[in-house]
Amino acid sequence: EVQLVESGGGLVQPGGSLRLSCAASGFTFDLYTLHWFRRSPGRGLEWVSYITGSSTTIYYADSVKGRFTISRDNARNSLYLQMNSLRDEDMAVYYCTRDRATVVFDYWGQGTQVTVSS
Amino acid sequence: QSALTQPRSVSGSPGQSVTISCTGTSSDVGAYNYVSWYQQYPGKAPKLMTYDVTKRPSGVPDRFSGSRSGNTASLTISGLQAEDEADYYCCSYGGTVVVFGGGTKLTVL
């Protein structure tokens, strides 16, 4: 059974940092491109970043470029999102997801809440 | 990276059909056969409903169908049921990025 489990969310002050993790199981991890998404009440679902199986290709949404860094450890079946210089508008539930093909996100984690507040 | 445009809300009565539109550009929706739709209930993870514009994953009822005309994709839900009440998001590949719509709240009257 495919499972994606996010962790690492929490309360952080504006300008602070957090590192999210996504532990995967039930599939051949290094064969899949993985994405981070987020959902906030005012902005709906928003794509954040993706990384290909061998980490050779990485892209970011303009809203997080230069502040967030996506990475993966195929030996540990884990995906990460390092978030720096956090802003109010980064407050959201963050999801990791597997891309079965091109924008075919067939499995999602349960999400981890990031709260940015002083 | 402009978001795709969806209506904020749509509604319909049980048994009726509703269509949710998703307007993009010739750089995303109109450029690639990579449009997918997701259903999301409050507090739950999104669920894939259609992909590659018109395909449907196994387990998704055939009441859900995707289509596209030019730069506008659509999700049609026929034979509306109470459990269809949820938020729906369209998604398109945009060359190097992924673009989402703002979401549409479907209310079953």
Image (cartoon, coloured by chain):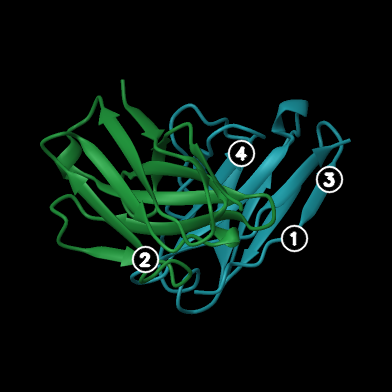
Chain colours: A green, B cyan
Residue that badge 4 annotates: B40
Residue closest to the far front: A118
Name the amino acid, label 3.
Ser
Check whether the beta carbons of the residues at disc 2 and disc 4 lie within 8 A of each other.
no
- Cα distance, mark 2 to mark 1? 26 Å
Asked whether residue B17 is in view, the answer is no
- Cα distance, mark 2 to mark 4? 23 Å
**Which one is in front, B88 or A90?**
A90
Name the amino acid, label 2.
Tyr
* Chain letter belonging to callout 1: B
Asked whether residue B36 is in view, the answer is yes
Is A26 situated left or right of B45 in this image?
Answer: left
Residue that badge 2 annotates: A60
Q: What residue is shown at x 48% (from left), y 36% (from top)?
A: A111
Pair 2/3: label in front: 2
- Cα distance, mark 2 to mark 3? 34 Å
Check whether the beta carbons of the residues at disc 4 and disc 3 lie within 8 A of each other.
no
Pair 1/4: label in front: 4
Q: Secondary structure at mark 4?
A: strand
Mark 1 closeness class: few <14, some 14–19, many ≥20 residues within 10 Å: some
**Which one is in front, B8 or B34?**
B8
Give the label on residue B7, or none: 1
Is B109 situated left or right of B103 in this image?
Answer: right
Q: Secondary structure at mark 3?
A: strand
* Chain letter belonging to callout 2: A
